[in-house]
Amino acid sequence: MFELKWLWKNLEGDRTRYILALCLSVVGSSLMIVNPYIGQRIVDTFIANDNAVQNLTDQRGLLIMLCLGMIGFSLLRTGLAYLTTMQYERSSQNVLYRVRVYLYNKIQEQDMNYYDHNRTGDLMTKMTGDLDMVRHSMAWIIKTIIESLTIFLAAVIYFFTIDVELTLWLLILSPPIFVVAYIFAKRVRPMYVDLRERLSQLNTTTQENISGNRVVKAFAREDFEVEKFTDKNVNYSKANKTAALVWLDYFPYLETLAQAFNVILLLVGGLFVMNGRITFGEFAAFSALIWAISNPMRNIGIIINDIQKFFASLTKIIEVYYARPGIVNEHKMQDKQRYNGSIEFDHVSFKYGNVEVLHDVSFKVNPGETVAIMGSTGSGKTTLVNLIPRFYDVSQGRVLVDGNDVRQLELDELRGNIGVATQDVLLFSDTIDGNIAYGEPDLPEEETIEYAQLAAAHDFITKMPEGYDTIVGERGVGLSGGQKQRIALARAMAVKRPILILDDTTSAVDLETEEHIQKSLRELEYPCTKIIIAQRVSTTAEADRILILDEGRLIEEGTHAELLAKRGYYYEVFMLQNEGIERQVTDHGKE
């Protein structure tokens, strides 16, 4: 099967250890028949024998050797079991480590479209629970299967050497047990696929609730979130119970058939002893090893249960393992160069699925220019700037940087020439200094402070308990929206890239702070082409050019003065914002 081939592939580096573990399992399980054989010799020679007393006297050395042999083989099996378990654990843990690293790297290299279609909770489940299920299967399920099968075969072979007919009487129960097990496996597999999906939904709900805890509290929706979580939890619990109850439906049949082995042994074996067909010692050997036949049959349902879980989890892992990003780094280069910073959109159209977001957009930005982009919500502003670092690929047309189609540029080099401050600010659970220097880990402390000052962040940072060494909570919890925006802006400027994209990064700051930031952007010490998405005219007024988007189309383009003269969308926004300011001043004067 493909899943097992995948497992074998990822065992590379630990195959010898795992094969050794399998061999030790076979050897250790085969040795289980030794003690029953020694027991048979003791019973037939020293207990159920007409000359038992004489034998105890004449063959005392043999008795001692047989007893020491039983002890020795018991200790040997214990040592082998320990060694075997260690080999299984080491190989499975090594595979777990390698696959987890590979999956993490695989997820990192996926394009934005992958994240748009995969839930965070589902990816977390694959990286944790599913991987651990695979490790558990390698270390215990496969081990259990090998050992059960080996013990069963060794016992059957040993029984055949004693009495073929009695062995066949015992094996008569095997076919019905396998039929019951097959029916159970066929019924339960889809249930575990559904169970795993419900677990992903539960994890997704939990992750979203924890990440959005401020919003939940702000709207006093704790009860609603608890109810939503409870609903997902109930669904998962029901699926778990359903799968468990299916096993209970078949358990009585399997257990009854397993117990029937003892009944057959007592009836047929007892009759054979009375007829003198087999000795008491041979009957004792059958009794000592009957569990080697009944236990595998009894455990077959549990094994199938775990195997179904294993394949359900492995299927999900393989989905990530073989996921291929639509945007890949096909042009590897050793020496990465610094771009001049020219940008051109050449008849660009873009679709999310079947929905067209941008339509035939064309414009050019010269190196060092500052271009502002305005437009109503949903007009395609963020999508447009996401095409420059190639987070998405265009549906039609071309995006060019320094005259080269971004699809022909080395991806790391392209993104290494672009600094980005996103609309949805994400700060990591690190110090403020670490967040500002995220794109440039070796950034000197004095430069960190310099860029924080340029982003108007230095003053509030120094007032924090530990200054730049203050730990920021997850996603910036504990900071205001404006503070997070300013740290993100400092992070984008600190990398000193020739292209700087700012997606509405001053929307949460006051006008005085915004003016300071605009001045800092104009006076950056390194040459930089700036693309700024903004809704305030105060932000766009001093841009070299302003682009107006509406429903994915470029409807206006020009300087502040030129667009005011056109009396279009930009003029209307200008008038609305200035009328609002005038009205506030007038109302304040009346008071």
Image (cartoon, rainbow, N blue to C red):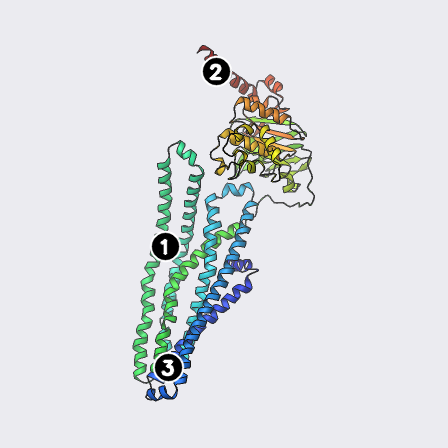
Q: Residue at x 51, y 60 (%)?
A: 90
Residue 212 pos. (x, y %): 44, 37
Closer to viewer: mark 3 or mark 2: 3
Mark 3, other Cα within 10 Å: few <14 / some 14–19 / many ≥20: some
| 2 or 1: tag closer to the N-terminus | 1
| Most foreground residue, 176 or 502 | 502
Q: Can the viewer see residue 378 in this picture?
A: no
Q: Amino acid at mark 3?
A: Ile
Residue 2 pos. (x, y %): 52, 58
The relative height of residue 135 versus residue 280 in the rendered view (above or below) is: above
| Mark 2–mark 1 distance (CA, rounded to whole Å) | 65 Å
Mark 1, residue position: 243
| Most foreground residue, 14 or 331 | 14
Mark 1, other Cα within 10 Å: few <14 / some 14–19 / many ≥20: many
266 displayed left or right of 76: left
Mark 2, other Cα within 10 Å: few <14 / some 14–19 / many ≥20: few
Quadrant for the C terminus, please: top left
The relative height of residue 431 versus residue 269 in the rendered view (above or below) is: above
Classify mark 1: helix, strand or loop: helix
Q: Amino acid at mark 2?
A: Gln
The relative height of residue 551 versus residue 568 in the rendered view (above or below) is: below
Mark 2, residue position: 584
Residue 270 figure quarter = bottom left
Q: Are marks 2 and 1 in contact (CB under 8 Å)?
A: no
Q: Amino acid at mark 1?
A: Ala
| Mark 3–mark 1 distance (CA, rounded to whole Å) | 47 Å
| 3 or 2: tag closer to the N-terminus | 3
Classify mark 2: helix, strand or loop: helix
Residue 42: numbered disc: 3
Residue 64 pos. (x, y %): 40, 81
Classify mark 3: helix, strand or loop: helix
